Amino acid sequence: MQIKINKRSAYAPIRYEATRPYGKSIGKAFVTQAARGEKARRAFIQESLLPLLKSAVARMGSENGPGPVQAEVLNVQIFGKYNHGGRLIFDISKPLTTALLMTDADDIPCGELAFPAESFYLHFGHNHALTDSAFAIEGAFVGHEAGRMWIDLVPAGFGQAHFFALPMGEALIGVSIDTSDGAKPITQALSDSIARIMEQNRAMLTQTEELERQLSAQYGQVVKVPSPAARLDEKEPVLRRAMALIVNALFYITSDTNDVHEDWCRDTPEAAAAALRNARNAGEVRTIENTLLKAGYSKVKFVGKGFAASTESHAIEDAVRTGKNLASHFRRGHYRRQPYGPERSLRKRIFVAPVMVNASSSAEVPGRIYDVE
């Protein structure tokens, strides 16, 4: 069975792999060097990574502007971490995404963050309210290690085949967050980390502005050099909204495991899907699955199908669709500390799903409660 990876996959990691033939090899080289320590990681980035990428992109076509390879310097590192983490994709259902966008996360301490793996990808789709000034966000690469969390937001359509023809390339919106203070709320940690990065990169920003002036003169038009770290203050609003959505999604994934189901991704070739359904034994299944994996397809963890069928989900959907006054009828989802144990002396954090109050009568649609510890 001949299977080719889908360059138009619904999932950004699959599109990226399909359109960057160097993604796996250079991403793996980065992870290998990073595992040897900070000195080796920095040396690889500063001395080897850019020449490798310039050579690889040149084999695909001519760059149209200063941005494509610069953006890939960050993108290939993120993709390398994603591969190293097990190539996990969590597909969050639209109704659950809507509910989690309406769920507070401001008071979640860094010490209570929940992660299903070291690094992974969250897919939300782009038909929701998480947008930047110019584009919608369809997902996020997420990772963590030793007192640090990073998120990289993915604009809708990221992973274009002719990215090298885009003057600015395809840049993600990312930030590394210091989570070492377990008592600090995650949103405060985000703001503090952005401020710290801005201060550290003030000199870099000056250099970038000078480079932009030189390139603008060279190209005869205004040129902006990709530098997400230097402009994080402009991205803080969308990063704060995304952080709340990501944190809430992670709590849901780790607390309601019965609503997480693994299957092949939605754009798996129909011929392969049919062959899997008709396989006569475990050996045939393994052969087909290995063929899919080698072609770059992945199994996906679908999250929130049960929630999508719930009473509270339908009530929220009805309120959004009909334009009801949510301030009067909607109680935001939230997390709270719940007493339990001997004489209720212990505490655990629980998630209370958003609920509709008096949606159609005097009754309140019951919410769900999830133990997140």
Image (spheres, helix red, strand yellow):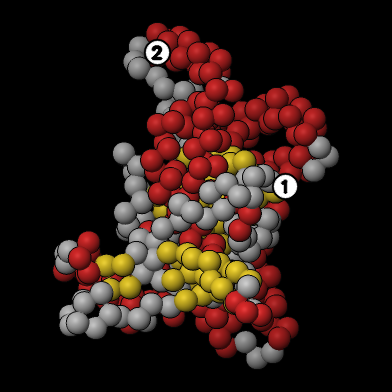
Q: Tell us which disc is closer to us: 1 or 2.
A: 1
Left or right position of 266 against 42: left
* Label whose residue precedes the other's in the sequence (1 or 2): 1
Quadrant in which the N terminus appears = bottom right
Q: Residues within 10 Å of mark 2 (few under 14, many from 20)?
A: some
Location of residue 48 (image quadrant): top right
Question: Is 324 in front, or is 79?
Answer: 324
Q: CA distance from mark 1 to mark 2?
A: 41 Å
Q: Position of residue 363 (x, y in %)?
A: 24, 83
User: In the image as oriented, which residue stretches furthest toward the right?
Assistant: 36
Location of residue 292 (image quadrant): bottom right
Residue labelled with disc 1: 146
- Secondary structure beneath disc 2? helix
Tell me the residue at 20%/65% (across/down): 328
Q: Position of residue 327 (x, y in %)?
A: 22, 61
User: In the image as oriented, which residue stretches furthest toward the front?
Assistant: 343
Question: Is 257 in front, or is 76?
Answer: 257
Taking the image as drawn, is residue 343 in sight? yes
Question: Is 248 in front, or is 362?
Answer: 362
* Residue type, label 1: Ala
Tell me the residue at 69%/76% (across/down): 287
Tell me the residue at 31%/67% (across/down): 331
* Residue type, label 2: Ser
Q: Is 75 drawn above or below residue 358 in the view shown?
A: above
Taking the image as drawn, is residue 260 in sight? no
Q: Position of residue 369 (x, y in %)?
A: 47, 76
Left or right position of 244 against 262: left
Q: Is 14 drawn above or below residue 367 in the view shown?
A: above
Residue labelled with disc 2: 216
Q: Which mark is residue 83?
A: none
Tell me the residue at 63%/71% (across/down): 346
Quadrant in which the C terminus appears = bottom right
